[in-house]
Image: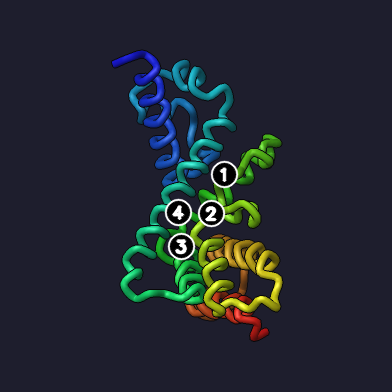
């Protein structure tokens, strides 16, 4: 195998192993030695692929959101025979994101830990793959659904869809993190609360609130 191809293969393997360990153990609890052992390479090799630990963490966030985006696309593909409207797609995707904390609380912890580590390292400006991407030039499934909704009339042209888009992601992610971390005294059912939160944003896109 050519050296360049081998390097890319090892770099990808390192990123995958790091992401797996970060999700399972936590970002701060996982050392470069742990990642090297899991990938079957040396610590020195890791630093040839990634100059800093922060660069490796950043690479895992790209990979993580690529996988989530792929899951969303697969979800939509399975529903295409139903000829979903724009607002139906929006509802489907918001509920998908909102159930992450119920089905995979370790994902939510990873997101929080990774972004905290990157923030502390001063590299959050480099995070571009995670939702919400810049509305104007995003081709994410949610933005595509919003555009479809505007075209088919299920999303109101009287509302600020850009503002709702950003608020929906921030509110849903924030609520998921509070649930996972147990930083709320609310004793209501978490899944039901998330469904109601998603429905509020659906109604906002429709111009009903």
Please name the residue shown 35% across and 19% down the image: 6
Earlier sequence position, callout 2 versus callout 1: 1
The quadrant in which the N terminus is found is top left
Earlier sequence position, callout 3 versus callout 2: 3
Per the model, the C-alpha gap separating discs 2 and 1 is: 24 Å
Please name the residue shown 56% across and 66% down the image: 147
Q: Nearer the viewer, residue 198 or 72?
A: 72
Earlier sequence position, callout 4 versus callout 3: 4
Residue of label 2: 139
Per the model, the C-alpha gap separating discs 4 and 3 is: 13 Å
Please name the residue shown 49% across and 17% down the image: 48
Residue of label 3: 100
Q: Position of residue 200 (x, y in %)?
A: 60, 79
Earlier sequence position, callout 1 versus callout 3: 3
Q: Position of residue 96 (x, y in %)?
A: 45, 66
Please name the residue shown 64% across and 38% down the image: 126
Helix, strand or loop for disc 2: loop
**Badge number at residue 114:** 1
Per the model, the C-alpha gap separating discs 4 and 2 is: 11 Å
Earlier sequence position, callout 1 versus callout 4: 4
Residue of label 4: 69
Crowd band around label 4 with a 10 angstrom C-alpha radius: few (<14), some (14–19), many (20+)? some
Q: Nearer the viewer, residue 121 or 157?
A: 157
Earlier sequence position, callout 4 versus callout 2: 4
């Amino acid at each position: 195998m050519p050296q360049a191809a081998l390097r890319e293969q090892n770099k990808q393997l390192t990123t995958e192993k790091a992401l797996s360990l970060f999700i399972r153990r936590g970002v701060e609890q996982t050392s470069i030695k742990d990642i090297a052992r899991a990938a079957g390479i040396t610590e020195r090799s890791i630093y040839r692929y990634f100059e800093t630990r922060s660069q490796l963490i950043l690479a895992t966030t790209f990979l993580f959101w690529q996988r989530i985006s792929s899951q969303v696309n697969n979800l939509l593909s399975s529903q295409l025979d139903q000829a979903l409207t724009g607002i139906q797609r929006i509802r489907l995707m918001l509920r998908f994101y909102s159930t992450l904390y119920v089905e995979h609380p370790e994902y939510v912890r990873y997101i929080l830990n990774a972004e905290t580590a990157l923030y502390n390292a001063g590299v959050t400006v480099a995070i571009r793959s995670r939702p919400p991407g810049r509305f104007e030039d995003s081709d994410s499934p949610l933005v595509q659904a919003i555009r479809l909704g505007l075209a088919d009339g299920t999303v109101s042209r009287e509302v600020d869809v850009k503002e709702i888009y950003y608020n929906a992601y921030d509110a849903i992610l924030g609520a998921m993190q509070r649930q996972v971390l147990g930083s709320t005294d609310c004793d209501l059912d978490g899944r039901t609360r998330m469904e109601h939160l998603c429905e509020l944003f659906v109604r906002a896109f429709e111009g009903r609130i």
